[in-house]
Image: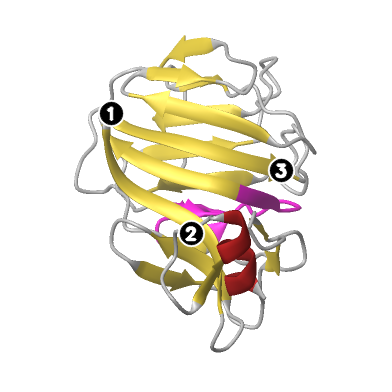
Amino acid sequence: MQARRRLLTGKKSRLPHGYQELLYIDNVAPSHSYIITDVIPTDDLGFDCKFLTHSSISDSSSLYGCIFGGRRSSGNNDFQLTTYKSSTNAFNGTLRTGAARGYEIDAGITSGVVQIAQKRYSIYTNPSGTTSMTSSYAWNQSVCPIYLFALNNNNSPTQYGPGCAIYVMKFYDGDTLIRDYVPAKRLSDGAIGMYEMVTSEFIENARENSSFIAGPSV
């Protein structure tokens, strides 16, 4: 049926045979599935992220959640997009790019809404189109790779919150696309994960005894 639909519409799947592209995948609680990437934070690390978060804009650990991120410890080689807000500011979620104080900006996130956040070099564009500048940071050998749908805290997943859905997740080194994660289903066994277009690799959920919720087929 999908092949027939492509013939009728003229649309060709981006994914190889055996995989079905999905509009999004979701790790709404209690799923708490997550994806391990090999993306390492730097000042020039950019991203395009289309997402919907189920988490609240909050400083309560049971309410806020990370869309993606990686750090050695809080404020130490720390790169994350999250609905966390400090009790001392009026942020709508936080983009952290290095440390804590002086390296946090208002992410402009709205809970329960499909939105797009972007970063190129030191310029962050929030979902409403407002731009902010990030600060330069001395990244070192303690940098941890980024997880999707959770925060990699010293190589351990945390801060899932109530969960989120990711529609688009691209990472850039400057202007060069280095990773393009497409929500996908592997047809041979029904596994739900991300098909990474640059390396042609299907990446499965890293959490045992859980599974992503699949969005509609594209």
What kind of residue is marked 3? Answer: Thr
Lower sequence index among marks 1 and 2: 2
The quarter holding residue 185 reads bottom right
**Start-end of magenta stretch:** 146-166
Q: Residue at x 71, y 60 (%)?
A: 215
Give the secondary structure at mark 2: loop
Viewer-proximal residue among 4 and 146: 4
Give the labeled residue for mark 3.
53
Give the labeled residue for mark 2.
12
Against 85, residue 170 (above or below) is below
What kind of residue is marked 1? Answer: Asp
Against 42, residue 105 (above or below) is above
Against 4, residue 88 (above or below) is above
Q: Could you give the CA–CA distance between mark 3 and mark 1, rounded to whole angstroms?
A: 25 Å
Locate residue 63 relative to residue 159 in the image: left or right: right
Q: Residue at x 58, y 79 (%)?
A: 191
Tag in front: 1 or 2: 2
Locate residue 89 relative to residue 157 in the image: left or right: right
Q: Residue at x 42, y 36 (%)?
A: 47
Contact between labelled residues 2 and 1, with CB atoms less than 8 Å apart: no
Give the secondary structure at mark 1: loop
Q: Is any part of residue 85 visible from this angle? A: yes
Give the labeled residue for mark 1.
43
Q: Quadrant of the N terminus?
A: bottom right
Locate residue 140 relative to residue 87 in the image: left or right: left
Residue 36 in the image, given as x and y percentages of width and height: 43, 63
What kind of residue is marked 2? Answer: Lys
Give the secondary structure at mark 3: strand
Q: Could you give the CA–CA distance between mark 1 and mark 2, rounded to whole angstroms?
A: 36 Å
